[in-house]
Amino acid sequence: MSSENQETETQQESGEEKQDTQEKESNPVKAEEAKLKAKYPNLGQKPGGSDFLMKRLQKGQKYFDSGDYNMAKAKMKNKQLPTAGPDKNLVTGDHIPTPQDLPQRKSSLVTSKLAG
Amino acid sequence: MAGVGGGNDFQWCFSQVKGAIDEDVAEADIISTVEFNYSGDLLATGDKGGRVVIFQREQEGNNRSHSRGEYNVYSTFQSHEPEFDYLKSLEIEEKINKIRWLPQQNAAHFLLSTNDKTIKLWKISERDKRAEGYNLKDENGRLRDPFRITSLRVPVLKPMDLMVEASPRRIFANAHTYHINSISVNSDHETYLSADDLRINLWHLEITDRSFNIVDIKPANMEELTEVITAAECHPNQCNVFVYSSSKGTIRLCDMRASALCDRHSKFFEEPEDPSSRSFFSEIISSISDVKFSHSGRYMMTRDYLSVKVWDLNMESRPVETYQVHEYLRSKLCSLYENDCIFDKFECCWNGSDNAIMTGSYNNFFRMFDRNTRRDITLEASRESSKPRAILKPRKVCTGGKRKKDEISVDSLDFNKKILHTAWHPKENIIAVAATNNLYIFQDKIN
């Protein structure tokens, strides 16, 4: 019961200060925007624009050169190759993928735990 | 505060929870879609591991007025497997993006399940009889020597333990270059649509080698790409009408009678934006993650990052109702952008009579709004409130300085506990809520 009274009190308060809160409404978002720009000054001019959409469309894209891979597999016995960078999924350019780098693809043949 | 969705005198109670309890959640176990069938007797879930689990409601044999049938496992099968498109060097996830049931026409049940690239029609049928006394084969199935058979007999049907079989009846593949986000069965029960980021296709349920492209928003020059399709749905009773939503917060309603290619919409729904509130985040948080028609077909509901909006199909200029889901996140957008949470795609759903709507939030909270009384409630899907028929206590997030008892502050919210998928029984007050790898079922309790 007491919690209900407290709720109506807050409602009355916000009614009086409604104009104030409306003015402040955009401020938290603007403040967040300023924070983001401060951290990443090079963030694109087009927010949610082409770059972000292109990334969405390219989900799942893996880059793999079978020639490089087989060469690396052959050479592996002889000398040590540059190890994988922090992002194992982004295998492209002059990094030669080794068998360990390739992400394992296996289907889940185990029954779902929801059915357990 | 009393519950929402059917009057002032009922409250939501815990009914069941499915799934593992352990803290270590395997990625494959994350539930990615939840859907009741048309009668509500079957509840299907899909997960990231490409598996479908179907629960069936127990028949209410005992006449206990306050108890309801429980949902138990009916069938489970591997719907999709991970694939690799060697030509495009593209990894195709087995995650089930959507499940949609077909209306029941005979004893078997049919559903459509889709991952990013392929839609499958599954038939789920029961077998409770077996024929015995074949002439050409013996009890073990081995063929008998035909020359040894001296008499004929008629095989007899004998009862057997119920077996539920799921078999793929149709595979609709190779029609989507981009990732499928929606499927929707048409009210004609013959066709369905599938939508990816840039295109929408119309299929006939019987035909797998052809589909009609009905929407194509791919620009001639990909550099000019400004928006993608985020969701699409067929109208519940007008088989020529469908809608699709975009990443820019707009909804287009299309009429298939108008032209073969529905690139030009019949109606365009967009809420005018207040230019003074425009920010870096505006477009991202306006992106619509789900669109659902009301059962009546008069309204549609859209979910964007912070709110749920109800639109009257007769009014394109602005929604008729807007409900704030978690407005307190507005002051956290920077960190939500950094941890990618701002891109989370929440779904929304109507109750059977269209007077209440539900959607998920973070910290395993989910929200319900009563359209008539304008009351809203926040509930939590948690193992702690999981005693049978335990009434769920409303939750409150405190935004200001003073945190009252039982409130939780915004900074304490667990953003890894997202409720993206919820479903409401088509006729009763029973809801299914997917909390990562657990499925919660809640029911109302009439006082």
Image: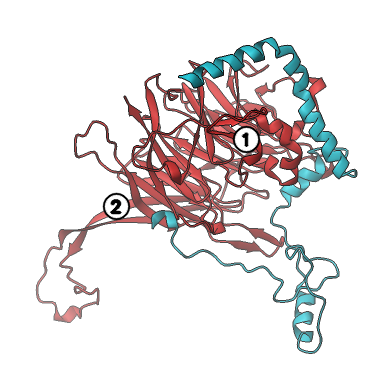
Chain colours: A cyan, B red
Q: Residue furthest top?
A: A16
Tell me, yes or no, if residue B350 can be seen here: yes
Dot 1: few (<14), some (14–19), or many (≥20) neighbours within 10 Å? some
Disc nearer the start of the sequence (2/1): 2
Q: Position of residue A85 (x, y in %)?
A: 79, 67
Q: Is residue B334 above or below residue B401?
A: below
- Classify mark 1: helix, strand or loop: strand
Q: Which SS class for mark 2?
A: strand
- Residue ID for mark 2: B126
Q: Chain of mark 1?
A: B
**Could you tell me which quadrant the C terminus of chain B lies in?**
top left
In the image: residue B273, left or right of residue B180 = right
Same chain? Circles 2 and 1? yes
- x and y percent of residue B105 in the render? 34, 39
Which residue corresponds to the image point at 47% horizontal and 52% vertical from the top-left? B170
The answer to whether residue B256 of the structure is visible from this angle is: no
**In the rendering, at what x and y percent does residue A46 appear?**
85, 37
Q: Kindly report the distance in space between the C-alpha atoms of the residues bearing marks 2 and 1.
A: 50 Å
Closer to the camera, B378 or B31?
B378
What's the residue at 69%, 70% (across, down)?
Answer: A102
In the rendered structure, the answer to whether residue B242 lies left or right of residue B340 reads left
Q: Is residue B44 left or right of residue B57?
A: right
The residue shown at (76%, 76%) is A69
Tag 1: amino acid: Ser
The residue beneath circle 1 is B409
Which mark, residue A105?
none
Q: Residues within 10 Å of mark 2 (few under 14, many from 20)?
A: some
Amino acid type of disc 2? Answer: Glu
**Contact? badges 2 and 1 (CB < 8 Å):** no
